[in-house]
């Protein structure tokens, strides 16, 4: 009986419930839920068209502007979107805001890389097409 009580007293000390996702540790499921909802909304509603264009036009400058922009998170004024139904939670809920900021940063980085790689892929496709086309002389 003493062993049973010992297990009941010691086991909760070593069994912390933690959630791992997005390379972060959440110790509360509500914090995780709000953060995850912010991340999902950012992937859907954050507008990153300008970042794609920045990556696209930064090729002649050896991608210096896109590299600098890659490491800078988006400004708060870019986070608000009228199409987002949870837009009011950006100011109210800190966990939702952190998730939205994290998701928008990831989406911005993805669009910058896509913009920088697009011209390289187009030139490569044209080059492969020219090489693989038989010449009829």
Image (cartoon, rainbow, N blue to C red):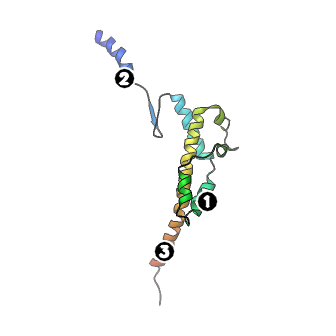
At 59% from the left and 32% from the top, the residue drawn is: 94
* Local secondary structure at mark 1: helix
Q: Which dot, 3 or 1, sits closer to the camera?
A: 1
Q: Do the residues labelled 3 and 1 touch (CB within 8 Å)?
A: no
Q: Residues within 10 Å of mark 3 (few under 14, many from 20)?
A: few
Decide if residue 90 is in sight here.
yes
The answer for how far apart the CA atoms under marks 3 and 2 are is 60 Å
Which x, y percent locates residue 76? 64, 42
At 54% from the left and 29% from the top, the residue drawn is: 30
Q: In which quarter of the image is residue 97?
A: top right
Q: Which residue in the structure is indicated by mark 2?
A: 14
Q: How crowded is mark 1: few (under 14 residues within 10 Å), some or many (20 or more)?
A: some
* Local secondary structure at mark 3: helix
At 65% from the left and 46% from the top, the residue drawn is: 78
Q: Which part of the image, by quadrant, shows the N terminus?
A: top left
Which x, y percent locates residue 136? 47, 88
Decide if residue 37 is in sight here.
no
Q: Residues within 10 Å of mark 2 (few under 14, many from 20)?
A: few
Q: Is residue 47 left or right of residue 120?
A: right
Q: Which residue in the structure is indicated by mark 1?
A: 53
Which x, y percent locates residue 7? 33, 16
Question: Does residue 137 sit above or below 8 in this rendering?
Answer: below
At 31% from the left and 13% from the top, the residue drawn is: 4
The answer for how far apart the CA atoms under marks 3 and 1 are is 23 Å
Residue 127: assigned label: 3
Q: Which of marks 3 and 2 is nearer the N terminus?
A: 2
The answer for how far apart the CA atoms under marks 2 and 1 are is 50 Å
Q: Earlier in the sequence, mark 3 or mark 1?
A: 1
Looking at the image, the residue that sits furthest to the top is 1
Q: Earlier in the sequence, mark 2 or mark 1?
A: 2
Question: Does residue 108 sit above or below 37 in this rendering?
Answer: below
């Amino acid at each position: 009986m003493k062993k049973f009580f010992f297990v009941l007293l010691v086991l909760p000390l070593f069994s912390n419930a933690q959630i791992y996702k997005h390379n972060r540790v959440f110790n509360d499921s509500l914090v995780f839920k709000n953060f995850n909802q912010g991340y999902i909304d950012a992937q859907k509603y954050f507008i990153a068209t300008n970042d794609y264009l920045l990556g696209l036009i930064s090729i002649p400058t050896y991608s210096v502007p896109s590299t600098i922009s890659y490491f800078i998170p988006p400004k708060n004024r870019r986070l608000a979107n009228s199409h987002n139904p949870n837009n009011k939670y950006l100011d109210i809920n800190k966990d939702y805001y952190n998730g939205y900021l994290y998701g928008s940063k990831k989406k911005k980085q993805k669009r910058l890389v896509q913009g920088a790689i697009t011209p390289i892929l187009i030139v490569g496709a044209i080059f492969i097409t020219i090489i693989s086309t038989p010449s009829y002389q």
